[in-house]
Image (cartoon, rainbow, N blue to C red):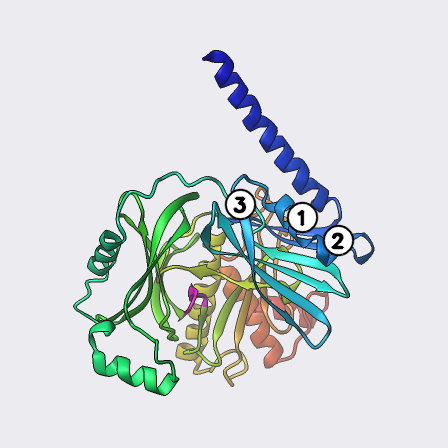
Amino acid sequence: MRKIITSIAFLFFSSVVTQAQNAQTVLDRATSTVYDNDQGLSLITFNANYSFKTSETPTVLANLLGSLGTGFQKLNETTDPFGYAHTKFSIQYNGKPVNDAVVMVHSKNGIITSINGQLSPISEPINTLAIKADNALQTALTHLKAKTLKADNLAEERHIKKVLQQPDFSYKPQLETVIYKYNETYRFAYKVKVYVEEPLFNGYVFVDAQSSEVLGQQSLICTIDVPATANTKYSGTQNFVNDQFIGGYRLRESGRGSGIETYNLSNTSNYGTSTDFVNTSTTWTATGVDQAATDAHWGAEKTYDYFNLVHSRNSIDNNGFKLLSYVHYNNNYNNAFWDGQRMTYGDGNGSTFTILTALDVCGHEITHGLVQKTAGLNGGGTGEADALNEAFA
């Protein structure tokens, strides 16, 4: 028995080593990489003279995803006006789709230029497929407190079939078995798609395929300016506004001036690749560095409110100037700044400073914008105008 256990351990260790070596063959050709705090490796860019051909895409993805049982399936491909091809792949594990896990391969003239998305291996689900689909559906309906379903409204279904010219359209609930990431583990889950008329909900509920626990939900009903709460890093639990889209909730709102939006730079200085902070509900409970994103968003709202309520100003230019915040600038960046168009916040190096999104910092940087839009004083230098700018801010 001891020999068998030793052999199994050796094979597992060998598999892990080989997996890492395969991934390294791809990373060795990278000019830059970005690691997401939750997903691991999320972006790779390549030197055009030392990259891979698009014909090598299956091998490249296999080396990156690595873990036994992980596969991928091509979903679609588009070409933009600049000649770049963008190919989307879904990620699977033992034939089951991994929910919301996709990879985008970008190429030009047959050469891969970058890859982004779920680029880290998928681990084996910790549960089993033990409950029936009917049980999962009932669990989802109970969770949603469903009183009436759209599928029971035959007149509505006839209408939508007619206007969409889709005679096979149905509001009937649909179920699919997927791999769902929950609390840093992967689980088999039923993805229940259901349209509830009362109380209104159209989207997906994810039910653990073994325990019947509801793991999460995604709404397909998109609205703006939804009340939310966050456990901010520096100011405790606060109320703020986010918006809702197909992927969940994000740090955007349109009710104050031309809007307030907060984005993730993912420890780069490239604003063009920034992404939304996304949450599955209106209760933001993130911990770690991403927790401070809600500080920046809430801080921008409170600063707008101060100038609006106390000084009757509609944002910093009195004309609704959109307040844009960018969090996680570069690596170990010990500062925050206003650059003429937006606020940018570094994470600090952990010893001198932690992430710089506290309310006083947000108010300070936004007020630099107000000084620019009003007095037009210089900033960042040593003259009198620079000193006044800092003093006012």
Pick the front one: 174 or 278:
174
- Image coordinates of residue 295 in percent, x first then y, are 45, 59
Is residue 284 covered in magenta? no
Q: What stretch is highlighted in magenta?
A: 245-251
Q: Please say if the residues under marks 1 and 2 sit with CB atoms less than 8 Å apart.
A: yes
**Residue 59, disc:** 1
Give the class, few, some or many, for how many residues have Cα within 10 Å of label 3's Cα (few <14, many ≥20): many
Above or below, comparing residue 199 to residue 131 in the picture: below
**Residue 70, disc:** 3
Name the residue rendered at 22%, 52% in the picture: 135
Q: Which of marks 1 and 2 is in front?
A: 1
Tag 2 residue: 52
- Image coordinates of residue 108 in percent, x first then y, are 74, 65
Which residue type carries mark 2?
Answer: Phe
Cα–Cα gap, marks 3 and 1: 13 Å
Q: Please say if the residues under marks 2 and 3 sit with CB atoms less than 8 Å apart.
A: no
Name the residue rendered at 48%, 46% in the picture: 93
Secondary-structure class at tag 2: loop
Secondary-structure class at tag 1: helix
Q: Quadrant of the N terminus?
A: top left
